[in-house]
Image (cartoon, rainbow, N blue to C red):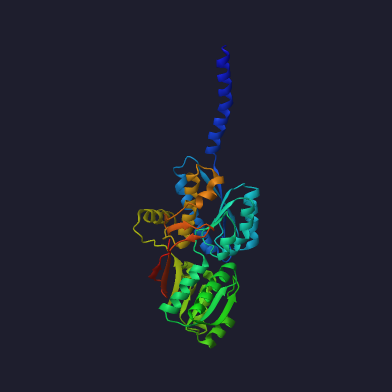
């Protein structure tokens, strides 16, 4: 045989396994970790977020050549179990991407582990400003508390024209963040904080705090936390005849809150990141239709944020041609991503620019949009 042909044949034989291995590698299933509060205090929104995440990957996998598999772990709404879940996903499952947790405290507890192992982590709900310093691999597609607290402080002081406020917030990283943001901005405007109270996550009795509030006679009670506790607070406010205007955070729009406290109040003003399930935009209509087909109810904001977080990761994985080591850098290039929760732009510190609503919730469960704040881009 001609020596030149022999050399060509040998080179071809050496190249073929490499090509085959590369193709095989690209066709392998990609594992995506999920850490979510599926039991415990934040289980209701946690389950909704997971539904949104699952829907996004289900829709992607329907037509995808390279499938993506979710490995779901329950943080049980606490830091210890969240950290255990993160260690398991990294050491046992070898994931390079993690969605969750929605709770700031759990997310921030897991962040150093993700950063140390170069695992990209994105929360669909964590909002504590400490996320900005959590690391290069740490992202949140949810508005941080300092903006949320500023918007509500401005609304209460300027629009509601209320100058004396009691602040009652959950004793967690989330509660501490939104508490500080509201208090700092409200007092800077010239308002007076009559009382600052914290309650524990999972607490069900609020008599002592409500008696203090009743005696102070505030213009407004600003309350922030998770749906179950908020429901019990508002229900008990009526029971103890502590009837004052209420302003608060996104959890007032949660079904769990409404189920507990329905007809215990006239109306509540609350802030919430942008999401309009009645939008006529094609991608929102499609999302709502697909969700309703599976769950027979309209998707709420928790579902929407889980869905967008998942789709942002899917976009980054495809943009990098399945090179998971490049996903982190790709996320920093995302600007005005048009999801079901509006436009998403990531800042250089992993936080996000998004728009926000002020809504009014009535005692019978009806909700009305009052104002929309657009973030400057």
Asked whether, in this view, residue 358 is left or right of residue 128, the answer is left
Residue visible at 46% across and 57% down in the picture: 345
Residue placed furthest toward the bottom:
215
Query: Whole-percent x and y of residue 290?
Result: 41, 53
Is residue 161 depicted above or below 303 in this figure?
A: below
Residue visible at 65% across and 61% down in the picture: 80
- The total number of labels drawn is 0
In front here: 179 or 214? Answer: 179
Residue placed furthest toward the left:
280
Asked whether, in this view, residue 205 is left or right of residue 263, the answer is right
Query: Whole-percent x and y of residue 210?
Result: 55, 82
In front here: 304 or 115? Answer: 115
Query: Whole-percent x and y of residue 366?
Result: 39, 71
Is residue 135 depicted above or below 164 in this figure?
A: above
Quarter of the image containing the C terminus? bottom left
In front here: 181 or 32? Answer: 181
The answer to whether residue 8 is seen in the rendering is yes
The answer to whether residue 234 is seen in the rendering is no
Quarter of the image containing the N terminus? top right
The quarter of the displayed image where residue 134 is located:
bottom right
Query: Whole-percent x and y of residue 273?
Result: 45, 65
Residue placed furthest toward the top:
1
């Amino acid at each position: 045989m001609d020596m030149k042909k022999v050399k060509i044949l040998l080179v071809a034989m050496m190249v073929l396994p490499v090509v085959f291995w590369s193709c095989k590698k690209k066709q392998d299933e990609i594992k995506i970790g999920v850490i979510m509060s599926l039991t415990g205090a934040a289980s209701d929104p946690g389950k909704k977020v997971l539904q949104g995440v699952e829907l996004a990957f289900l829709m992607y996998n329907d037509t995808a050549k390279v499938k993506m598999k979710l490995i779901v772990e329950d943080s049980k709404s606490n830091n210890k179990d969240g950290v255990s879940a993160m260690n398991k996903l990294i050491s046992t499952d070898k994931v390079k991407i993690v969605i969750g947790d929605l709770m700031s405290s759990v997310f921030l507890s897991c962040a150093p582990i993700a950063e140390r192992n170069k695992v990209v982590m994105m929360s669909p709900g964590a909002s504590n400003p400490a996320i900005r310093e959590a690391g290069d691999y740490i992202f949140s597609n949810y508005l941080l508390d300092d903006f949320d607290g500023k918007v509500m402080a401005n609304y209460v002081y300027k629009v509601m024209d209320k100058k004396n406020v009691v602040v009652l917030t959950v004793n967690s990283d989330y509660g501490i963040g939104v508490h500080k943001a509201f208090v700092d901005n409200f007092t800077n405007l010239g308002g007076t904080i009559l009382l600052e109270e914290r309650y524990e996550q999972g607490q069900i009795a609020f008599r002592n705090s409500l008696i203090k509030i009743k005696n102070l006679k505030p213009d407004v009670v600003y309350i922030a936390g998770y749906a179950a506790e908020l429901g019990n607070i508002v229900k008990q406010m009526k029971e103890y005849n502590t009837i004052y205007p209420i302003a608060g955070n996104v959890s007032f729009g949660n079904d769990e809150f409404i189920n507990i406290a329905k007809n215990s109040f006239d109306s509540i003003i609350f802030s919430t990141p942008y999401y309009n399930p009645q939008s006529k935009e094609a991608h929102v209509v499609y999302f709502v239709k697909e969700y309703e087909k599976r769950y027979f109810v309209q998707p709420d904001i928790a579902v929407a944020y889980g869905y967008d977080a998942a789709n942002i990761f899917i976009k980054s994985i495809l943009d990098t041609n399945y090179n998971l080591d490049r996903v982190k850098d790709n996320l920093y290039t995302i600007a005005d991503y048009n999801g079901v929760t509006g436009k998403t732009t990531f800042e250089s510190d992993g936080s996000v620019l998004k728009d926000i609503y002020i809504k009014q919730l009535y005692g019978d469960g009806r909700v009305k949009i009052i104002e929309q704040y657009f973030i400057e881009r």
